[in-house]
Amino acid sequence: MVVTRFAPSPTGFLHIGGARTALFNWLFARHHQGTFLLRIEDTDRKRSTDEAVDAILGGMRWLDLTWDGEPISQFARSGRHAEIARQLLDEGKAYRCYCTPEELAEMRDAARAAGSARLYDGRWRDRDPSEAPGGIDPVIRLKVPEGGETIIQDIIQGEVRVGHDQLDDMIMLRADGTPTYMLAVVVDDHDMGITHVIRGDDHLTNAFRQAQIYASLGWEMPIMAHMPLLHGSDGAKLSKRHGALGVEAYRDMGFLPEAVNNYLLRLGWSHGDDEIINRDQAIEWFDIKDVGKAAARFDMDRLTSLNGHYIREAGDDRLVELILPGVENELGESVGEAARQRLLNGMSGLKERAKNSLELIENALFYVRRRPLALNPKAAKILDAEGRGMIEHIRPHLAQLEDWSHEGIETAARVAAKAADAKLGAVAQPLRAALTGSNVSPGIFEVMEVLGQDETLGRLDDALAAQD
């Protein structure tokens, strides 16, 4: 059975690149009817925070990337990690190193001057511990083979190899007894039964080091898949100016989770020319072997366009619930049931013009504002003496109208325009200004149908009562 994991460090929010890694692990597991686990790599106690853990879990839940079982804390397993280090020590596959910080600095400088990748010279590898200096707590280092090479068959990168002369005898247990990242990851992945490690290609060099621990323990190494990292639209490393933000920032900018998931899915993976891919299709089609080797480019404009599609596809009830808190925040008061119903009735027209929920909030406010409406400058200009005269002319037609439907209202407006020897637009624009407080809105006859006859006539009376 396929078992994947997402293993973020709780030192900040769930980064958009991390979200893509989580998504690919989740999809691969679900595609194979496998298990998707979540591990919080919180061994860096100085930088790990509960707030960051909450942000990561919240981001995962918002994207609906549900994990199996309870999240696993890496820090809570430090005793197990130390146990494995001592096991390797007892088996002669690791050793205690008593180098001082000064000695290590000298070694690094000498290695770099010589152009060597090995920054530690292995001086305690075969040395008798009885020679250990006093007052120094040792670290435990793994004995890496001195000859040959390690080859990894990576699903995405293909065959990759490194000579052992490029690898140090890495530290597994620090002088204070705490495990290093390299050891903890291997032990956790083994104990959790991880079959596939899907992560960014910045971890590829780690894979060769971790392979040495697997080999020393006689454990089977998971299948590796290292994805290229995301770049910005200009090809540079992804940064905040490109959109390298936390997942919650996209939520706050008005993006829908299904749009973010769909967009992240298409960054480095494709299924023919399909752009709109729903969750069921993604699970059916996704395979990690189809992820490309080239870095994908994050484009905020494309994400925004995709989000507009999902806004239009979303149910009206869902969108009303989504924007209601923002609407009430703008109004500074709760929305009554009548106003809420107007929002619901008008949503089909509103969502056609919105690319995110923030635009939806802004465009929906006129449906729920208390009378009299404030006018923007362009609407005020439209409602000059001539504009109010047109409203005064059409009001009786609307007051007498029995068929208060889009079609009935438009017919009445055309009759009124013809009686005034005017074009329909000369009637529609003053109506729009008076009923919405703006010069732009969904179709004005649709708006009037949503507002209802009483509210429409009341807003028109407000406009007629206004002074120049």
Image (cartoon, helix red, strand yellow):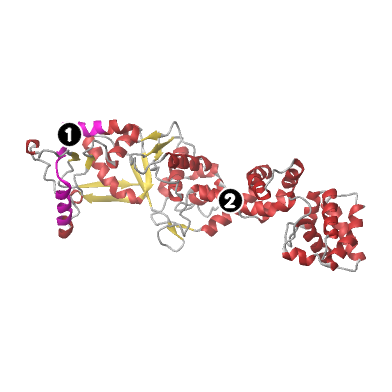
Rendered location of residue 295, percent (x, y): 40, 57
Identify the image quadrant of the N terminus.
top left
Nearer to us in this view, 230 or 140: 140
| Res. 4 image quadrant | top left
Instruction: Look at label 1 and name its amino acid.
Output: Leu
Mark 1 or mark 2: which comes first in sequence?
A: 1
Rendered location of residue 298, percent (x, y): 47, 57
Residue 310 is one of the magenta-drawn residues: no
Compared to 304, does 12 lie above or below?
above
Nearer to us in this view, 463 or 87: 463
Identify the image quadrant of the C terminus.
bottom right
| Residue 405 visible to an observer of this rendering | yes
Nearer to us in this view, 137 or 82: 137
Give the magenta part as a residue range. 82-110
Number of numbered discs: 2
The kind of secondary structure element at disc 1 is: helix
> Separation of disc 1 and disc 2 at Cα?
54 Å
* Residue sitting at x 43%, y 56%: 296
The kind of secondary structure element at disc 2 is: loop
Q: Which residue is the site of mark 1?
A: 89
Instruction: Look at label 2 and name its amino acid.
Output: Gly
- Name the side, left or right, on which 394 lies relative to 173: right
Q: Which residue is the site of mark 2?
A: 254
